[in-house]
Amino acid sequence: MTKFLETDRLTLHAFTAADTDHLLALDSDPEVMRFINGGRPTSREAIETRTLPRLLHDYPCWGTRGYWAAQEKITDTFLGWFEFRPLEEHSPAVVELGYRLNQAAWGRGYAAEGSRALIHKGFTDLEVERVSAHTMAVNTRSRRVMEKSGLSFVRNFTRNWPEAIEGSEHGEVEYALNRIEWEQPR
């Protein structure tokens, strides 16, 4: 297990194939998947053939991953994952921030804590110039995490999804933070 980042309460490390059962449990929770696909569970086959290859991908501009398994530092309990990946394979300039945590981790500040740490690492160590994040407009909890992480609302937008899910008629939102804004004294 390659440790990527540590916070006061979290350890973020590279995924391995041994994380399959953790991912299956996470993606089988209807509440966790509510704003992803309407709450449908992900099959083991999909985890093994689609999800894991995406999570195990190394980005050439960093020589490392863009998705990180999150564990509670004290107990080593799997909490979920964080996404901090370049939008272009060979350029670290713009990254997408995301997170998917199990219900036991909700409301405890883990998502904002991990996001702030990734943003700091991105701007100080990884040559990131802009961090962006997206969610459904009705996903108020995720939007609040983005705000607590220092990102600001940029826009509402709509995109065509293969299947509409409850709330998708309200569209999506983008939040972002640029390096220049992050460096400003607060």
Image (cartoon, grey):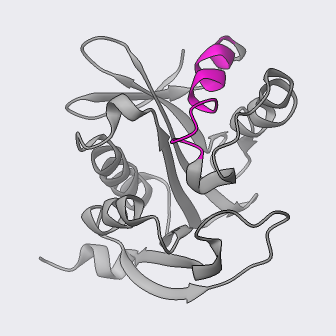
> Looking at the image, which residue sits at the far front?
166
Residue 55 position by quadrant: top right
Tally of numbered discs: 0
Instruction: Tell me, yes or no, whether the highlighted magenta stretch contains residue 28.
Output: yes
Side (left or right) of 16 relative to 83: right
Which residue occupies the extreme left position in the image? 186
Residues drawn in magenta: 18-33
Image: 176 above or below 28: below
Please identify the quadrant where the N terminus is shown: top right
Looking at the picture, tell me which residue is in the foreground, 13 or 160.
160
Query: Is residue 111 positioned above or below 123 on the image?
Result: above
Residue 10 vertical position relative to residue 57 in the rendered view, above or below: above
Residue 44: percent from the left, percent from the top? 79, 21
Q: Name the quarter where the C terminus is drawn.
A: bottom left
Q: Position of residue 78 (x, y in %)?
A: 44, 20
Q: How far from the left and from the top, in percent, is residue 53? A: 80, 33
Residue in the image at 57% along x and 50% along y: 34
Closer-to-camera residue (125/149): 149
Q: Is residue 67 left or right of residue 59?
A: left
Q: What residue do we see at 59% from left, 22% from top?
A: 25
**Residue at (29, 11) in percent of width and height:** 75
